[in-house]
Amino acid sequence: MMNLTAVTHGRPKQLQSLMCCAAALLLSACQQTQIVFTPTEPPSLASFEIPYPLDNHLPESGVIIPATDPMFSDEVHTELDLPYQLHRLASVQSTHDLSSNSLSNRVSLAAVSSQAPFNNPDILQIALQEKARAQAIHLADPCLETFSIRVSLHSINLSLTCPDDVNHIYGLLVQFWQQNTFVDATTAPVDVDNIRRQLKLNKHLNAFSGAEIDKVWREKLLGPEHPYNKVLNNDALFDSLNLKQLQQIQQQASSQAQWHLFLPNMQAKNAEFDLQGSIKQWPMLTTSLPKSFPKSSSHEDKLETTTPKQTKKIYLIDAPGSVQTQVRLGYRIDHSINHAIGHTVDSELGDMSETSQLSSQEVALSCRSLSALMGRSFSGRLYYDLREKRGLTYGIYGQCANAPLSSSIKFYGSTAIEHTGAFVVGILDHLALVKTQSASQGEINALKTYLIGEDLLSQDNSIQRENQYLQQLATELTQVDVQKLNAELQALTPKRLQQLANGAFSGEPLIILRGDIDRIIPDLTSKLPEWQLERVKVD
């Protein structure tokens, strides 16, 4: 019995020993296996040519014509010294607005500063949102529950959309700009402690979500001394903010702003506006404001900034343990840099290094057309190749940032850690291809259809309509300028697009990656050996 027991207990021990040896061999084999990352491939383009009719019974689509009528009509009252420019929604727009209830009136009060960015607009946005929340509770006015705010570096737009009379809505909006609005007990004071908490929370959320990469992008693209980098993310002020400082931020914004009031057209219900009453309610009567709004001097003369020269350098933000790499890649487009726009791209016919002074229209045309050509979601070159053909990403997109003091084109997306090198190389290959190979006429036609259709759809949405108009005001594009831009877009040819690409994508692009650095560096070094890698620490 003793021997039988010993044998019975011995077998499991032998099996355990064999299993341990097998596991050790497997682990050893895994450690010695070299990881093979995704290979690179030449860029692939979609075909926009239709070789035969899909259905002879289908009607041919007509050419999409861009809108020529203005979105808003400006009311001029020479007998009154209005502190704002009054805009009425054009009558043609009201019949097909897909974004608002026809029984409601939308009123917006916008502060625009085209000459310089607002200081601390990120703080002011949180503060005004907190004011709206407190005011809605205190006054129990359902109209305040529709409060919306859209803030950019050059505009702050407050809107309310409700069935009330436009004069009542206007009265609610101007309260946000009263000099003592953040401490006024009659309209509900704000909780400055809560504002500080939200600002700090947003900073932590950005680091957690990966949005911090956009902060690094802006710093590396523009340089630390650029106004756009000096008016945002004031961490010291986030910590010490008090009501007095909050009032100073608000009053500074109101003093540098040109004001624009957007009202529904006269055919809308309760749209009769009391001009005299609006002047009495205006919170900035002591501020010296011009009666008219003349066109200012060119943006090139406003602020002299030094554009950082981009070299073959990839900036890396470490995110240990992440399973994907965030990618930002693009170019800055300024009004005066080495561009080939307006010059031939044929090497035997001319040199593309000539410095040209770009107009606002040329910057806007380059920014819009090229960002859409490469990154307009499903039909963009990058999406088609890097997702549909090669499966390197869930999505890659293009963004045109056309601002008064700087414009840029950025391509952004995320990819798996093992695809990082191939993903970046794929974007770079397409940027090189668009400069050397003309697009087909079919692709040009598809691009025009997309951009003009996008413009038409934006006019059917009240929010996008106002944003588009405020963008024109900030960049000082008149309606005539917009029509010229649309005409250039309609006349776009493959050769012209190639000229735009050689101008906008000149020099080296800015590349910023956020991912697990230790895992992606070997792949980057292998696929991009001529590029220098530099780690960036985010504050």
Image (cartoon, rainbow, N blue to C red):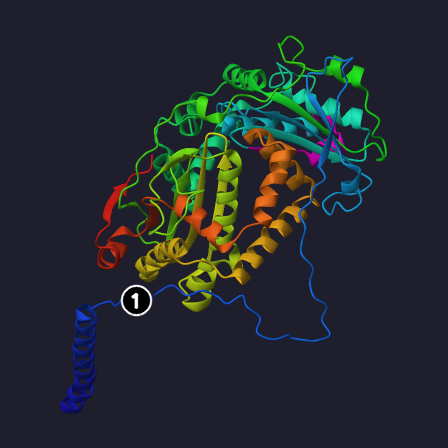
Query: Residue 326 location, x and y as percent?
Result: 38, 51
Locate residue 131: give its quadrant.
top right
Q: Which residues are magenta?
A: 137-151
> Which residue: 55% across, 62% down?
442
Residue 518's place in the image compared with 304, above or below, is below
How would you rate the neighbour count of disc 1 (Cα within 10 Å): few for under 14, some for 14-19, many for 20 or more? Answer: few
Viewer-nearest residue: 228 or 162: 228
Q: Quadrant of the C terminus?
A: top left
Viewer-nearest residue: 7 or 172: 172
Is residue 85 shown to the viewer in this render? yes
Viewer-nearest residue: 469 or 415: 469
> Which residue: 42% across, 44% down?
343
Query: Residue 528 location, x and y as percent?
Result: 25, 55
Q: Name the side, left or right, on which 7 lies relative to 146.
A: left
Residue 98's place in the image compared with 50, above or below, is above
Query: Residue 79 location, x and y as percent?
Result: 78, 12
> Which residue: 66% across, 36% down?
466
Locate residue 355: give its quadrant.
top left
Q: Amino acid at mark 1?
A: Pro
Mark 1 = which residue?
39
Q: Quadrant of the N terminus?
A: bottom left
